[in-house]
């Protein structure tokens, strides 16, 4: 999704002032966080406004987002906050120095220990960003609150060791979180099919197969055996 970036939006500016004023006095001293939030807030506001439109108050969602960001920032280690500062003036994921590899955990490794054994190999290839998927069950997502039962990526000693190894090698770890599409068996999709107006708004729905069939002429089918879909 590419949206025209507004250099200044009065509504975004006023909302940001309200949000910052609601932060605790102690947290307002976290100037690195405040500066990064301020630098990106107009773009975030534009995305939220486009996504939610008039269906839901944009301000409520953004205030909740910042509340979560503040909570998680407070939990970040001094090391990670230092790493944040290294990239505060650029989007590191767009850098030509970032070389990423996407790994299906059930294909590349069965358990976290399998990934640990391959860290030297990945580093020798020049890989400095590891993107692991899927962790939810299954794809397309049926339940976005549960890990894939076959996944080894639970919060345990092995995963913590992976994170430690990644940081020691000055690499980055990304664990997949699928939030932009669901299975037709997902509870939201079932509610939409049952006529719930709120959940109908989560999806594009069609009266017949005319438009979907046009899409499927050129969009390849994904996961045809386990969960037929196109995205």
Image (cartoon, helix red, strand yellow):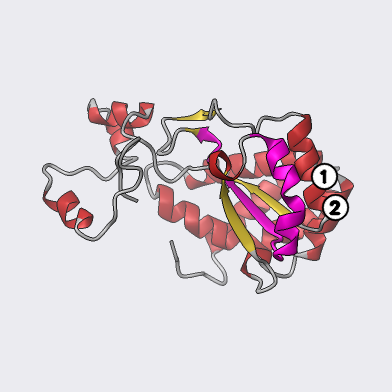
Q: Position of residue 113 (x, y in %)?
A: 72, 37
Look at the picture and state if 193 lies above or below 125: above
Residue 148 on image: x %, y %: 53, 30
Query: Residue at image x 34%, y 51%?
Result: 231
Residue 207 rendering spot, x and y as whole percentages: 12, 42
Tag count: 2
Gap in Å between the C-alphas at discs 1 and 2? 6 Å
Q: x%, y% of residue 78?
A: 88, 48
Left/right of residue 154 with respect to residue 224 in the rendered view: right
Q: Secondary structure at mark 2?
A: helix
Badge 1 vs badge 2, beta-carbon distance below 8 Å:
yes
Residue 126 counted in the magenta span: yes
Choose top left, top right, bottom left or bottom right for residue 200.
Answer: top left
Give me the disc on residue 228: none
Q: Residue at x 59, y 52 (%)?
A: 15
Indicate the quadrant where residue 99 lies: bottom right
As helix, strand or loop, the secondary structure at mark 1 comes to helix
Q: Is residue 80 left or right of residue 199?
A: right
Residue at 16 percent of width and 56 percent of height: 214
**Position of 197 compared to 207: left or right?**
right
Is residue 210 shown to the viewer in this render? Answer: yes
Please tell me how crowded label 1 is: few (under 14), some (14-19), or many (20+) other residues with Cα within 10 Å: few
Q: Which residues are magenta?
A: 111-136
- List the residue tagged with mark 1: 164
Determine which residue is flagged by label 2.
168
Viewer-proximal residue, 222 or 2?
222
21 in relation to 155, above or below = below
The answer to whether 151 is drawn above or below residue 123 in the figure is: above
Left or right of 60 in this view: 127: right
């Amino acid at each position: 999704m590419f949206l025209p970036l507004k250099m200044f939006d009065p509504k975004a500016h006023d909302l940001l002032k309200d949000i910052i004023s609601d932060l605790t006095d102690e947290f307002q001293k976290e100037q690195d966080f405040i500066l990064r939030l301020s630098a990106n807030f107009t773009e975030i506001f534009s995305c939220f406004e486009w996504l939610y439109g008039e269906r839901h108050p944009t301000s409520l969602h953004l205030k909740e987002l910042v509340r979560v960001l503040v909570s998680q920032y407070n939990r970040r280690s001094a090391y990670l906050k230092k790493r944040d500062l290294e990239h505060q003036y650029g989007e590191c994921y767009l850098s030509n120095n970032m070389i990423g590899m996407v790994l299906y955990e059930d294909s590349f490794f069965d358990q976290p220990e399998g990934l640990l054994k391959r860290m030297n190999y990945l580093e020798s290839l020049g890989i400095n960003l590891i993107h692991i998927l899927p962790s939810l069950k299954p794809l397309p997502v049926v339940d976005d609150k549960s890990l894939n039962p076959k996944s080894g990526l639970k919060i345990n000693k092995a995963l913590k060791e992976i994170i430690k190894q990644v940081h020691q090698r000055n690499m980055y770890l990304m664990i997949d979180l699928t939030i932009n599409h669901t299975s037709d068996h997902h509870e939201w999709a079932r509610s939409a099919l049952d006529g719930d107006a709120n959940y109908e708004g989560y999806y594009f729905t069609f009266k017949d197969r005319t438009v979907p069939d046009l899409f499927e002429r050129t969009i390849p089918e994904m996961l045809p055996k386990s969960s037929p879909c196109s995205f």
